[in-house]
Amino acid sequence: MIQPSYGDVESPRKQMERGVSAADVMCKAGLERVIRTNGDAACVKPDTAERMKKAGMLLIPINFSDLQKDIQSVTASEKEMQTVPASSMSIVNFYITDQDLNTAHSGIEVVPIQGLFEFTINGIPIEGPKNMIETGPNTGEFYIRLELPDTINGRPLSQDDIVLIKYLDESDYSGEQRILVKSVPLTKTFAKVESSGGGSRIGHEFTVRIYEPDANRDSKDEDKIPLSSLEYRGDGGIRTTLANPRFDANSSYLIETGPNTSTFEVKIKIPRELDGKVIHIGDSYEIRYIDRSTPSGTDEKIILKGRIG
């Protein structure tokens, strides 16, 4: 919900450092409070909140009316499992829709999950939560928060490990047990940097492309990412950004390829010289982007590695 303005409202981080719970954080007028998958509150614009929700970056629904819309849009099946992306050594948030568990239609159900779920990582069983809680009175949709262990069989969890969730439905309409299964690959970031066209030969134009849902702020128009957001590192200690005019970019920004695509592009050329240092054929380089809005709640480096052709 949109919070009223109470003079100089502190940032969410400062409020939580004072002991305010994430659910009670106040936001400036015009901003919405959301709770990210790492449990921290944030104050964002309404359209940003909606995009974060669709990307699975929020721990709980934005507000009750949004939740009702989501429930109405669910497939006709009364039994469905929905998951959101998970970060390593963090939490998997997911929802199960099962109207058979919705017995107290005027209240919110809290249901023990023992015997209803099995959780594994790469086939190895892990301990799950004790209960799941209905998202609202008479919704039939239940929220489960699965905390992941730091290690599995003595090995730290890593990118692309698979969390498998099995729901053992004991009351299918046919009278037989049915199992719903969802697999959730662990991820640290949604962003991805890549290149295409012309390779990376000196003086030849090629395209740098980034997939970044967080930069997609306007679903009806093309958004932009400043070239200064991408760092270029090369042999010989070269450190600069794509905003350096020597790259002869066709734009001062990476421009979204179309409304609501979340994919941004710019065309650049590798120069013969950067910051007084000569670039040679065979030199290696990196183009780096820092994703500051990740499922893990950490800043993650996204690196594209290449070699000068």
Image: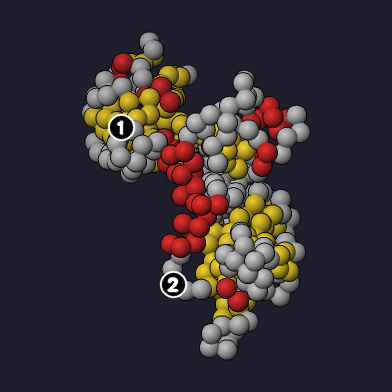
Location of residue 57 in the rendering, given as x and y in whole percent from the top left corner: 53, 46
The answer to which of 82 and 278 lies nearer the viewer is 82
Q: How is the image coloured?
A: secondary structure
Q: Secondary structure at mark 1?
A: strand
- Give the number of marks: 2
Q: Which residue in the rendered view is the most extreme toward the front?
A: 106
> How far apart are the alpha carbons under marks 1 and 2?
39 Å
On screen, residue 52 versus residue 244, left or right, reads right
Looking at the image, which residue is at 53% across and 29% down? Answer: 29
Q: Quadrant of the N terminus?
A: top right
Q: Is residue 3 above or below residue 269?
A: below
Q: Are marks 1 and 2 in contact (CB under 8 Å)?
A: no
Looking at the image, which residue is at 48% across and 34% down? Answer: 45
- Dividing the picture into quadrants, the one containing residue 130 is bottom right
Mark 1 vs mark 2: which is more N-terminal? 2
Determine crowd level at label 1: few under 14, some 14-19, many 20+ residues with C-alpha closer than 10 A: many
Q: Secondary structure at mark 2?
A: loop
Reading the image, the residue beneath label 1 is: 255
Q: Callout 1, which amino acid? A: Ile
Location of residue 266 in the rendering, given as x and y in whole percent from the top left corner: 29, 31
Location of residue 259 in the rendering, given as x and y in whole percent from the top left corner: 29, 41
The answer to which of 4 and 147 lies nearer the viewer is 4
Reading the image, the residue beneath label 2 is: 76
